[in-house]
Image (cartoon, rainbow, N blue to C red):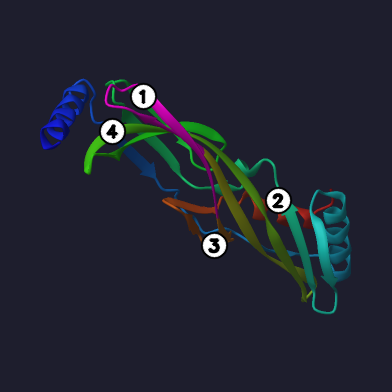
């Protein structure tokens, strides 16, 4: 029995000599955070500015959740399809060499819908011993952005101060097909998995999803502040 096991391991090792250990190198470039302007002073009366902001929000895709004029607060929520304008999670360059020595490069913006491949190895048990075999992960990433924002409007002298704080809820869903190969580098079997991760950033604070650092680009705050002007 022992000799049989040794012969079997030898066969596997001979097979593996035709298959390379896959390699992967991931370069990640973080976003450059900047201080975002989220307040403005308008030389117009509070009543005029308040009514204009409410009207412009009501005409937009933002949903008004609460209006409290006595507290001078307007709360809104949103779901934005064109999220890449409003969030920055850096960018990635992934270089892989698979078990057949085939090389591929995947370069993408991390806060984007994208497809990429990673490589790795797994241990396969064989008669109480283990051999290292290659695998590939085929990944489809989808990114979603939603959140809430608060306006605070207050009279000041002959004008109005407007302050905004936006909260950005960033969700990343990845569908992963993991393909396992045998000692000949031939397809063995596959498994499917889905992961879902999220983080919450606000106007001047970032958050992390896995390796990604995510922050606001300032475009959302700029867009919201534009509602103080006549549309």
User: Mark 3 or mark 4, which is nearer the start of the sequence?
Assistant: 4
Number of the label disc, if any, that sits on residue 104: 1
Q: Which residue is mark 2?
A: 223
User: Mark 1 or mark 3, which is nearer the start of the sequence?
Assistant: 1
User: Mark 2 or mark 1, which is nearer the start of the sequence?
Assistant: 1
Q: Is residue 122 magenta?
A: no
**What secondary structure characterizes most of the magenta part?**
strand
User: Mark 2 or mark 4, which is nearer the start of the sequence?
Assistant: 4
Residue 121, percent from left and from top: 30, 37
User: Mark 2 or mark 3, which is nearer the start of the sequence?
Assistant: 3
Disc 2 packing (10 Å; few <14; some 14–19; many ≥20):
few
Number of the label disc, if any, that sits on residue 161: none
Q: Are marks 4 and 1 in contact (CB under 8 Å)?
A: no
- CA gap between label 4 and label 1 equals 20 Å
Residue 198, percent from left and from top: 56, 55
Dot 4 falls on a residue whose secondary structure is strand
Front residue (pair 135, 62): 135
Residue for point 49% across, 55% down: 34
Q: Is residue 179 left or right of residue 153?
A: left
Q: Which residues are magenta?
A: 176-197
Residue for point 43% across, 30% down: 189
Q: Are marks 3 and 2 in contact (CB under 8 Å)?
A: no
Q: Is residue 8 left or right of residue 205?
A: left
Q: Which residue is mark 3?
A: 204
Residue for point 23% across, 37% down: 131
Front residue (pair 175, 12): 12
Residue for point 14% across, 28% down: 7
Q: Which residue is mark 4?
A: 133
- CA gap between label 3 and label 2 equals 16 Å
């Amino acid at each position: 029995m022992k000799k049989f096991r040794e012969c079997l391991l030898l066969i596997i090792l001979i097979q593996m000599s035709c298959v390379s250990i896959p390699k992967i190198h991931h370069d990640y470039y973080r976003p450059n955070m900047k201080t975002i302007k989220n307040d403005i002073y308008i030389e117009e009366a509070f009543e005029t500015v308040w009514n204009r902001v409410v009207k412009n929000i009501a005409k937009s895709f933002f949903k008004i959740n609460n209006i409290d004029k006595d507290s001078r607060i307007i709360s809104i929520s949103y779901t934005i399809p064109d999220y890449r304008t409003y969030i920055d999670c850096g960018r990635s360059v992934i270089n892989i060499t698979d078990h057949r020595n085939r090389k591929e490069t995947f370069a993408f913006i991390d806060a984007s819908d994208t497809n990429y491949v990673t490589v790795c190895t797994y241990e396969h048990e064989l008669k109480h011993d283990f051999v290292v075999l290659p695998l590939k992960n085929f990944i489809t990433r989808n990114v979603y952005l939603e959140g809430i924002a608060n306006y605070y409007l207050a009279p000041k002298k002959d004008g109005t101060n407007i302050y905004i704080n936006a909260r950005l809820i960033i969700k990343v869903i990845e569908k992963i097909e993991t393909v396992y190969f045998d000692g000949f580098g031939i397809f063995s079997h596959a498994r499917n998995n889905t992961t879902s991760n999220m983080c919450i950033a606000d106007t001047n604070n970032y958050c992390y999803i896995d390796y990604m650092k995510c922050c606001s680009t300032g475009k959302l705050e700029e867009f919201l502040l534009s509602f103080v002007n006549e549309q």
